[in-house]
Amino acid sequence: MLVLALTGPAFAGDWRLVPTVGARGGGTVNFPSVGDDSLDVGLVYGLTANRTLKPETALELTWLRHDTGFEIRGANPEGGPFGLTVDTIQIGGVYSPVRKGKIRPFVAASIGVHRYDPEPSSFGSEVQLSMAISGGWEFRLSDRTALRLTGRGWFLLQTVALSGVCGGVGCNINISGSGGFQLEGTLGLAIDL
């Protein structure tokens, strides 16, 4: 049954898997009564699956895990720094112009969520909307493999407010929010299936 699912229409086409590793930094954590601190630069690793739609475009699904931490004096009841694991799931699109040769640039945009799991675990997990813009280069190693160098900018949506008023001449809708930014660099091995 698994073989039928993996060979069905949803899996038809050109697929690529890209395991990645790198570093992510930036962002601030705030405890209103105690203070704030920047997140430490930390290891990021994960897996991306691409499905080619046209020779120059692909649909991309990405999972990344970021291990980081921060220290705000007096905020941790157990004392010492906080550990923080951030799991990210994103879906988006990739554009890479068709070129001859071994080097191919790309740009991508995606949307998804970040899930924050702090340590100590007495603090609850939190999920926030996130968006990313990325770009980089692929260096073809063989017919089915390439080295993928990616730079990614993250926007993390932390609060959102939506309001609206309708009257005799129409409606007025206001959307506002706040968030944070992070930067990431990864190196991956792209494997065409």
Image: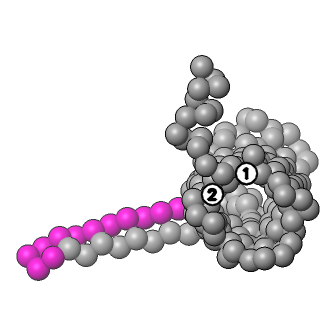
State the image coordinates of residue 104 (x, y, percent, origin top left): 78, 74
The answer to whether mark 2 and mark 1 are in CB contact below 8 A is yes
Q: Is residue 165 magenta?
A: yes
| Residue found at the very far left of the displayed protein | 168
Q: Does residue 99 belong to the magenta stretch?
A: no
- Label 1 packing within 10 angstroms: few (<14), some (14-19), many (20+): some
Q: Is residue 99 above or below residue 117?
A: below
The circle on residue 16 is: 1
Q: Residue 15: horizontal and vertical position, in percent?
A: 68, 49
The stretch of residues the image draws in magenta is: 159-170
User: Residue at left 58%, top 43%?
Assistant: 12
Q: Where is mark 2, residue-wise?
A: 52
Q: Residue at x 56, y 69 (%)?
A: 178
Q: Earlier in the sequence, mark 2 or mark 1?
A: 1
How many residues crowd mark 2 within 10 Å: few (<14), some (14–19), many (20+)?
some
Say whether residue 50 is left or right of residue 83.
left
Q: Is residue 15 visible?
A: yes
Question: Residue drawn 61% across and 34% down?
Answer: 7
* Mark 1: secondary structure: strand
Q: Is residue 149 above or below residue 105?
A: above
Which residue shows up at 89% across the image and 59% down it?
142
For the N terminus, give its image quadrant: top right
What's the residue type where badge 2 is placed?
Answer: Thr
Q: Which is more toward the observer, 6 or 40? A: 6
Secondary structure, mark 2, is strand
Is residue 62 shown left or right of residue 42? left
Pick out the residue farthest to the top: 1
The mark total stands at 2
In the foreground, 161 or 135 = 135
- Residue 22: tell me if it is visible: no
- CA–CA distance between discs 2 and 1? 8 Å
